Structures are given as structure tokens and as C-alpha cells.
Amino acid sequence: MLSSPSAPVRKGLVVPFPMAFRPADDLLRAPQPRVFLSPPHLAGGEMVALQATLDAGWVAPAGPVPLAFEEAVAQATGLDHVLAVASGTAALHLGFRLLDVCPGDEVWTSSLTFIASIGPAVQMGAIPRFLDIDAGHWTMDVDLLRAELAAAARRGRLPRVVVPVDLYGQPADMPAIVDACAAWGVPVLSDSAGSLGAMQHGRHAGVGAKLVALSFNGNKIITAGGGGALASEDAGLIARARHLSTQAKEVSAHYQHETIGFSYGMSSVLAAVGIAQIAALEERVAARRSVHQRYREGLEDLPGLGFIAEPAWSRGNRWLTVIRIDPAEAGVDRETIRRELAAQNIESRPAWKPLHLQPAFRHAAIAGGAVAAMMFEQGLCLPSGSSLPPADQGRIIDIIRRCCRV
């Protein structure tokens, strides 16, 4: 989801850009090497896996390597059926297709998320409706969802699909969401793009939904340099997704198509990188949780600063640590801190701008929205990479404390 400049990497360490590729203004301003928001962190076995794949002649999205990656994702998530695809957005698109989203159908999702959570459905002709988030854990407000579903039933216009989002690696309350939707026969597609390795109610993030979409983009906790996956406990759904992802080609000596599909397969090259990466998943989760904890210990005493809550039923992977800065209490606003970090060559980013505030969705319906809007105004994503040196993190904490005059 949140994209970050793709810094070169070597054995888990971020390598500064060569002099010829660094913008002139950065050279003049930057007293320190660039600190990125969420740079890729190599596990060390990627080159071996890539070479073995190339030596075997596999490059295309076919053969044993993507299948091996799918098995590794299945083991990591506990979801028995996995399809590796070209991106997390492709996974969501396939999910909407499998759930028979048609023009005029309503699709609901949280407002505080990346556009990919709803974009493919809108491109298919669906009508978006956005729901506010819980003020504690920043994921879909389940009480609001229940009320909105009941109101939609009275109108005779239930959503075709509900898409909860695991925000910044914090899982949504999937059993509660699934129960609320099941009362009205509405399926759930979980956008778990940033939550690989996160847990909810003793199961992996997203488990319990009819379909789960994952991402392996370059800024994710585990990356293949790109790619995504669609997973389910329903073997039939993933078999159909696999058919659609290969242009819906029928078994025949010639090209035969009973429906129209997509070219969404994950290449063997990306899958090879993913296999090497996913072996380090628990190590990466532990590292990001340690980064988050150091931020808490260094900042939680400051008035007006807060963090996403982690309910007892969950274990977030802390893909990104996000602080909330209440200017009335902190004496400083989000943008002041962001600009000061930028002046020190440290990348940070505002929390997602809610979709109901995006010009592309100016006519979309919104239920609530005040909490999401506040989180955008006050939320700041901090550098959270699993290879973030403690010294750099200490510098970030010091800058924030100075901004808050404490």
C-alpha cells in the first residue's frame, strides 16, 4: 500500500543512492543518508533462489516456482488455497469477479484506506459506499457496519460485498464483521494487503472472510518486488480464480474461451524472491514490532501523541507505525513534524486521505467519516522498516520530541 522510493538493498541493508542518481537539492540539504519509510529488506537467499529459477529456465508465470510460493503463503496464513498473482490490486479484482460484482451493485469498505481497496470494483461499475473506522484500532467500525446493514436491508439495497481493511498491519475484527454480514447474506472480501504475519482471534489476519487479498509490493513486510495473492478456505473459489487469471483458457489443443479472463499470473522470478523472503516472516514481524515498541517508549509520554490500539484479540505485524498528533494538546501539528523530518532527510507520510474526501469519489455515500478525517489530519506514518538502525530511530524520536518542545 504506502509506496516508498525503492532504495537499492544488499543483504538487508539499505544502500545510499549513487552520487549520480541523487537529486542536487538533496545533496545540499541532507546532513544524513536518506531514511526511508519502509524499504525492502532482503533475507539473503534471494540471489540463490533467482539463479536456481533462471538456471531451470523458468521465467513466465508458470511452472513449479509460483506453486511453491503459493504453498509457502498457505503455510504462513493457514489458508489452504492460494493463488499467486501480479499484484494485490489484481487479487482484489479477481475477488470482486468471483463474488459476481456487477454494474450498479454497492460495495462497502472503510474510508481510511488506499484506493485499491475499492478501485477495481468501481472500474467494474459498482457503486462505492464508505464506512468510518473505530477510533481505537482504526479498522472498520463494526457497530456502524451493523447499523448500516440493517438500514440497507430496510431500503432493499444490501451491498454485494463488504471489504474490511487491515490497516497498517493491524487486523480488523473479522469474526464480528463476518457475523454482521452473514446475518444478511453478504460476503466479505478482506483487504489484508499489509498484514502478512498479523493475527486476529488466534488466526491469521483475514481468515474467516470468504476471500483474502495479500500484497508483496516492494514496501511490504515480505516482498517479492511486486505481486500479490488471493487466498481462501474454499478450494472452488481459488480454482476459478486460477482459471480467470490465465485468460480463462479452456483445456483444448487450440485457444478456447467460454468467458473473458485476465493475465494476472505471478512470474517465476517474483515468486523465487518471495520464497526466499517469506522464510524470514516471523523475524520481520518481530523486528517491526520492536521498532514500534521503541517509538512507544520514546514518545508515549508526550501530551497529545497516540498510537493505533492493539486489542487483546489481535497481534498486528506493525507494518507501519503511525502516530496521531493532536495539535491542541501537543502544541504542534502533523505537518510541522513531517516537514522537520523531511528537512533531516527522513521520509514520513500523512495517514491515508479518506476515500470519501478524494475528488474521485466526491459523489460517493459515506456513513460517519469524522474519525477517518481526524486520523488523516493528525496521523503520521513513521519510518518502520525491519532494517531501521536504532540510531536512526533514536534520531527520529529526538526530532519529534524537539518539535513538541519536550
Image (cartoon, helix red, strand yellow):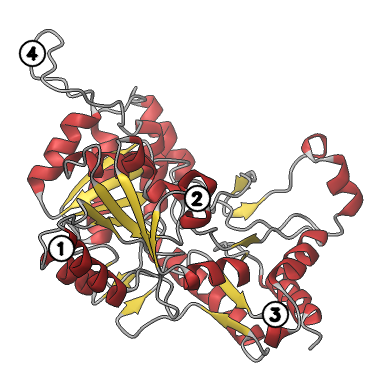
Label 1, on which residue? Answer: 153
Q: Separation of disc 4 and disc 1 at Cα?
A: 45 Å
Q: Separation of disc 1 and disc 2 at Cα?
A: 53 Å
- Image x and y of residue 52, in percent: 38, 33
Closer to the eye: label 3 or 4: 3
Callout 2: helix, strand or loop? loop
Residue 203 in sight here: no
Q: Work out whether residue 245 or residue 288 is closer to the camera in this orientation and state it.
A: 245
Question: Which corner quadrant of the image does residue 94 belong to?
Answer: top left
Measured along the vertical axis of the image, is residue 290 above or below residue 339?
A: below
- Image x and y of residue 82, in percent: 21, 47
Label 4, on which residue? Answer: 252
Q: Crowdedness of circle 2 by 10 Å Cα count: few (<14), some, many (20+)?
A: some
Of the residues shown, which amino acid type is indicated by label 1?
Ala
Measured along the vertical axis of the image, is residue 74 above or below residue 150?
A: above
Q: Which of marks 3 and 2 is nearer the N terminus?
A: 2
Q: Work out whether residue 104 or residue 213 is closer to the camera in this orientation and state it.
A: 104
Q: Which residue is drawn at 31% across and 31% down?
A: 264
Q: Earlier in the sequence, mark 1 or mark 2?
A: 2
In the rendered view, does 269 fall on the left or right side of 263? right
Q: Which of marks 3 and 4 is nearer the N terminus?
A: 4
